Image (tube, rainbow, N blue to C red):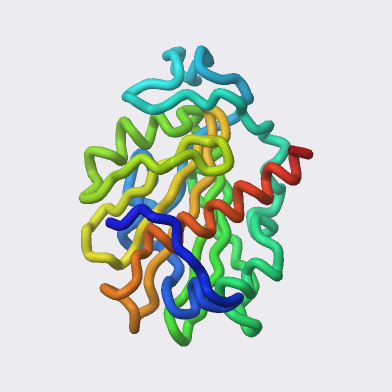
Amino acid sequence: MRMTRAVLVGAVVLLVAGCSATSDGTASPASQDPGVSQSVSSSSSESQSPSGGQLPHSGAPAVSDPLPESAIPEDPCDAFTREQVEYALGDDAPEGERGDVATGPACAWQDTDSGAGFKAFFGTVGGEGLSSYYQNTQPESEEWEELPPIHGFPAVAFQITADGMNCQVVAGLADEYTVAVAANPSRAKIGELDPCDLAQEMAELLVENLKERAGR
């Protein structure tokens, strides 16, 4: 799993050449549903989980400067601008399709012809943030790596199976909740393109959008 940031050459090269929406093979903190699980607060290192335990735990890093939950859009399909979706998938990119999961709101953009696409998850249910990933997802993952902070927020990338087909990048917005992007190579590019580069690129765009919403 190559954890360098993808260098993109044109406005339509990221996902048209490279990824599809991720349902299969990605995982939430507690299961292999591609959602994410976390909850609602904006405290940092000494916060408590809903179960009464201290956060963070299980080796997860603390979020030193949390983003308020109000920065998360009410509609998860507003995670990216239309320009950013076209940047990833081209001028004929599909509209986002909302598909909430138990762990929070989610939206997918998928090109059914090529298989290219990506999916954004907001982990606002559960209240465990990145700690739940470290506790539950890390042991299940074939590939797991801590990334450099994404716009100041701790992040990890993981693959449940090391087949190059999919990857999820998760950033902790607060100790209690996260945002994630899942990505797959297109059917024609599996094994040629690194899905973690693709997921990281889109996660960086998404976190930047959220910071702008928060006035940062």
Q: Relative to residue 98, is residue 95 depicted above or below? A: below
Q: Which one is in front, 23 or 93?
A: 93
The residue shown at (30%, 75%) is 192
Image quadrant occupied by the C terminus: top right
Q: Residue furthest right?
A: 215
- Image side of residue 75 versus residue 55, left or right: right
- Residue 87 x/y as whole percent: 61, 72
The picture places residue 21, in percent across and down from the top left corner, at 45, 68
Q: Position of residue 22 (x, y in %)?
A: 41, 63
Question: Residue at the location (25% across, 47% down)?
Answer: 141
Residue 132 visible within the image? yes
Residue at 34%, 79% in the rendered image = 189
In the picture, measured across the screen, residue 137 lies left or right of residue 205, that is left
Residue 36 is situated, as x and y percent measured from the top left of the image, at 46, 44
The residue at the point 51 percent across, 79 percent down is 111
State the count of labels.
0
Compared to residue 83, the image places residue 26 above or below, namely: above
Q: Which quadrant would the N terminus be assigned to in this image?
A: bottom left
Q: Nearer the viewer, residue 206 or 27?
A: 206
- Is residue 100 visible in the rendered image? The answer is no
